């Protein structure tokens, strides 16, 4: 019966699922054993978490008022993220234009730019901040420079795709009246990509706030650094207070970023 | 048999959405419920299988053993038990698109299978064979292995009918099953639903009086939340005008689409 | 020469531009941005990179195991995280649970997403000590945050008629989830999981550097020991790892996209 050929019997499907499940379970168990990771110990050793929580609560909010550098740290983190997004985004756009098929006719430049973007994307932030710390010393400046590189890496490829996805008819129309390549870029491509670009800049700022905090731990300055300091001297109640500050900060930035993005793009958010 | 007694639903501002709806449908009857928009047709239908709870009234349905249950008063477990034997066809795409037609048919008996078994093991081969027979009955057995999302509207509704058949139901309800279909598919669906009424009561809400006139054994018209008419499915123009009021010109336009190809 | 030019239309850009410049200046001061020192320092930095050249070729063999460990940490974090994310997503969907459970779950998911992974791993290390557990747990939580939210949004967009239809024929909530919800979200789930796996590989490296093990730890250790050539070897292995998993993940995702569309 040809109909029976087109369907798989439920019993066979069950055997398939059972096999996949068993194989996965075995693989996962083996890898856990290999890493020395016992998921059960999360529950048996949970008292460590309770102990830590005990030390962390109640949060010590005096750390904000006593230490006048904390509000400044927040400002630093915001500044790091802002400048990193601004410069990084701008450079990313430029390199994206150099790497895009429809704006760069010279293949060699396109290839070099693409390789640059890939390299910057793949190198971990850890290494980048290390190099900048060596170059300009620890602090928010090194962090900001790392964010510049990180932003180029994350968004360079995306910007290039946005540019390449532009519709060409407007460009062709402008060419046909005798315009130069630069003019085409200015009047055809930039208007098309501008909303998307701005939305991505806002998104980048959102992401970079979180990254900036993380970089602070490695000497990048800002509130992440303050947190690391508090933790290294075991002032866990200060740590909790700072964490709650971070949560509020990230939440606010995310909401504002979402709101502005929605206003620019309509109701369809990017990424 | 299904017995509806005095369904009432009142909005907070006093407006009566349902005002004492009562009727009985026996096995052998294919009842079409007509009426203008907002009259309460769909609300009534949703009371029949418990999707909506009226403020007062009873809906009494027989289960597979012949025991009578009042849908409006049963608890969750009983409701699920009764629903196993109620076939439903909704408007538009209401099946699981990423599952095959066969799987969607087998879903019909999920209520009758032990939960644990259905989740861990799935369906048995015997159930699959019976589901295939149901698909043969609606003449799309060759599409059994296709993903339901790839089927046309008419084919999908046939799968829905097959699902109902697979349940061995004691009652079949349909909420505007042909409203999204072209005339040819609509006729096919009505032709497939009608024979089912020989064994069980079938109640459907329709917006197409020309269809109910040709395929239903009885028509109930609901207007302003009340039963306005209950009887012969062939309605005179005068009666149609009384039921639909201003909406009549929309209905009349469609009549011309159907009538020529008798 | 500019007489014919109507510069007035640029007037509306003046104010935002001035604000932008002011904010940029302020931010630069706060960050102690000093671009002259960058010029000088860049030379130091770049020469440092040159100093790390060439990589210690003999160390490549020692890097294989730690690299594999980092991949495994990312793998386990993704597996456990995705499974839990499905559970959380179901609890965070308004068409599956009641309003209170849904909002509380979304709150916790949002909380997790606010904290950078570094902070989470440091706290977990403070609780459970150094080692892969802290790393795997952190990645698991990260998955729950990202995939949980994305899936919850997808679930909430599902057609309610489909679920009503299943409930109307007698399926209970669990069956509606297994037979209705899960099949429909499967393509999204696979796509998100592969995407998150890419992220988790990078995180695994960074988390390793603070003590979760793997090749990140090797990198940090080499730097600490001033064995810069060895560190460079580790860096090359890391780059290869990230490139490799990215490439694999992209190919898998493209394959799924094609099959999902036509099948």
Image (tube, rainbow, N blue to C red):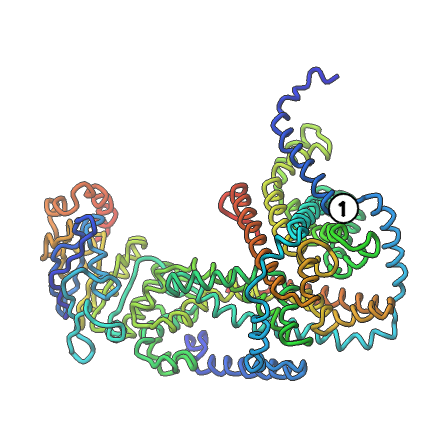
Q: Does the image show residue A65?
A: yes
Circle 1 Cα neighbour tier, 10 Å, few/some/many (<14 / 14–19 / ≥20) = some
Residue at point 78%, 55% (across, down): A138
Residue at point 88%, 70% (across, down): C56
- Residue highlighted by disc 1: C32
Which quadrant would the N terminus of chain C be assigned to in this image?
Answer: top right
Give the vertical position of A79 relative to C190 (above or below): above
Count how many numbered circles sit on residues in the image. Answer: 1
**Among the 4 quarters of the image, the one containing residue A25:** bottom right
Question: Under tag 1, what secondary structure?
Answer: loop
Q: In front: C12, or A21?
A: C12
Give the vertical position of B251 relative to C199 (above or below): above
- Residue C177 spot, x, y in % from top left: 41, 70
Give the vertical position of A156 relative to C67 (above or below): above
**Left of A241 or right of it: where is B184?**
left
**Left of B73 or right of it: where is C21?**
right
- Residue C126 spot, x, y in % from top left: 65, 72
- Residue C144 spot, x, y in % from top left: 54, 66
**Left of B113 or right of it: where is A159?**
right
Q: In front: A258, or A232?
A: A232
């Amino acid at each position: 019966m040809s109909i029976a050929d087109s369907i798989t019997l439920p019993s066979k499907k069950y055997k398939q699922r059972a096999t996949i499940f068993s194989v996965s379970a075995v693989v996962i168990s083996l890898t856990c054993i290999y890493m020395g990771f016992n998921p059960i110990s999360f529950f048996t050793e949970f008292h460590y978490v309770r102990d830590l929580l005990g030390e962390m609560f109640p949060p010590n909010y005096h750390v904000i008022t006593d230490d006048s550098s904390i509000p400044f740290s927040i400002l630093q983190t915001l500044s790091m993220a802002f400048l990193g997004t601004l410069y990084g985004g701008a450079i990313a756009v430029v390199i994206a234009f150099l790497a895009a098929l429809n704006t760069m006719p010279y293949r060699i430049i396109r290839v070099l730019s693409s390789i640059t973007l890939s390299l910057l994307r793949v190198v971990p932030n850890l290494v980048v901040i290390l190099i900048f710390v060596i170059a300009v010393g620890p602090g928010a400046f090194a962090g900001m420079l790392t964010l510049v590189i990180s932003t180029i890496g994350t968004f360079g490829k995306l910007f290039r795709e946005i540019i390449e996805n532009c519709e060409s008819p407007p460009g062709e129309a402008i060419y046909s009246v005798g315009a130069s390549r630069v003019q085409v870029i200015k009047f055809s491509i930039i208007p098309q990509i501008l909303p998307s670009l701005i939305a991505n800049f806002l998104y980048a700022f959102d992401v970079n706030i979180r990254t900036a905090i993380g970089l602070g731990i490695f000497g990048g300055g800002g509130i992440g650094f303050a947190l690391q300091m508090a933790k290294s001297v075991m002032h866990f109640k200060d740590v909790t207070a700072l964490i709650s500050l971070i949560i509020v900060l990230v939440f606010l930035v995310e909401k504002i970023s979402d709101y502005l993005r929605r206003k620019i793009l309509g109701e369809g958010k990017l990424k | 048999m299904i017995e509806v007694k005095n369904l009432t639903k009142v909005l907070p501002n006093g407006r009566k959405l349902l005002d004492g709806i009562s009727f009985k449908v026996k096995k052998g009857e294919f009842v079409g419920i007509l009426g203008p928009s907002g009259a309460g047709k769909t609300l009534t239908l949703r009371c029949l299988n418990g999707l909506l709870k009226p403020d007062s009234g009873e809906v009494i349905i027989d289960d597979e053993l012949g025991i009578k249950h009042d849908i409006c008063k049963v608890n969750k477990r009983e409701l699920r038990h009764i629903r196993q034997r109620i076939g439903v066809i909704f408007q538009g795409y209401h099946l699981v698109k990423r599952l095959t037609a066969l799987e969607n048919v087998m879903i019909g008996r999920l209520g009758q299978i032990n939960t644990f078994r259905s989740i861990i093991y799935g369906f048995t081969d015997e159930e699959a064979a019976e589901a295939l027979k149901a698909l043969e009955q609606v003449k799309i057995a060759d599409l059994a292995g296709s993903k339901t999302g790839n089927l046309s509207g008419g084919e999908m509704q046939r799968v829905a009918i097959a699902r109902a058949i697979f349940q061995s139901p004691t009652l079949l309800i349909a909420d505007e099953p042909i409203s999204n279909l072209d005339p040819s598919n609509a006729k096919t669906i009505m032709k497939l639903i009608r024979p089912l009424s020989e064994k069980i009561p079938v109640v459907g809400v329709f917006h197409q009086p020309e269809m109910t006139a040709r395929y239903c054994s009885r028509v109930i018209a609901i207007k302003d939340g009340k039963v306005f008419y209950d009887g012969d499915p062939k309605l005179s123009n005068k009666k149609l005008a009384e039921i639909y009021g201003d909406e009549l010109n929309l209905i009349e336009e469609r009549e011309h689409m159907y009538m020529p190809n008798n | 020469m500019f007489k014919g030019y109507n510069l007035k239309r640029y007037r509306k850009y003046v104010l935002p531009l001035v604000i932008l410049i002011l904010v940029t200046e302020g931010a630069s001061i706060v960050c102690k941005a000093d671009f002259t020192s960058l010029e000088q320092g860049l030379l130091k930095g770049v020469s440092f990179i040159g100093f790390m050249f060439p990589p210690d070729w003999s160390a490549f063999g020692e890097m294989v195991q730690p690299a594999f460990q980092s991949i495994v940490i990312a793998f386990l974090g993704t597996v456990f995280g995705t499974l839990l994310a499905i559970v959380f997503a179901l609890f965070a969907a308004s068409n599956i649970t009641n309003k209170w459970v849904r909002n509380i779950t979304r709150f916790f998911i949002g909380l997790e997403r606010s904290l950078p992974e570094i902070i989470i791993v440091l706290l977990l290390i403070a609780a459970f000590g150094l080692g892969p557990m802290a790393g795997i747990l952190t990645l698991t939580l990260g998955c729950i945050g990202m995939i949980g939210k994305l899936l919850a949004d997808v679930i909430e967009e599902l057609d309610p008629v489909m679920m009503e239809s299943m409930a109307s024929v007698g399926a209970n909530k669990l069956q509606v989830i297994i037979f209705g919800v899960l099949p429909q979200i499967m393509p999204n789930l696979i796509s998100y999981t592969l995407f998150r796996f890419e992220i988790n590989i990078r995180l695994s490296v960074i988390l390793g550097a603070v003590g979760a093990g793997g090749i990140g730890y090797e990198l940090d250790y080499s730097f600490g020991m001033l064995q810069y050539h060895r560190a460079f070897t580790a860096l090359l292995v890391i780059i290869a790892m990230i490139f490799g998993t990215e490439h694999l993940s992209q190919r898998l995702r493209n394959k799924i996209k094609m099959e999902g569309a036509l099948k």
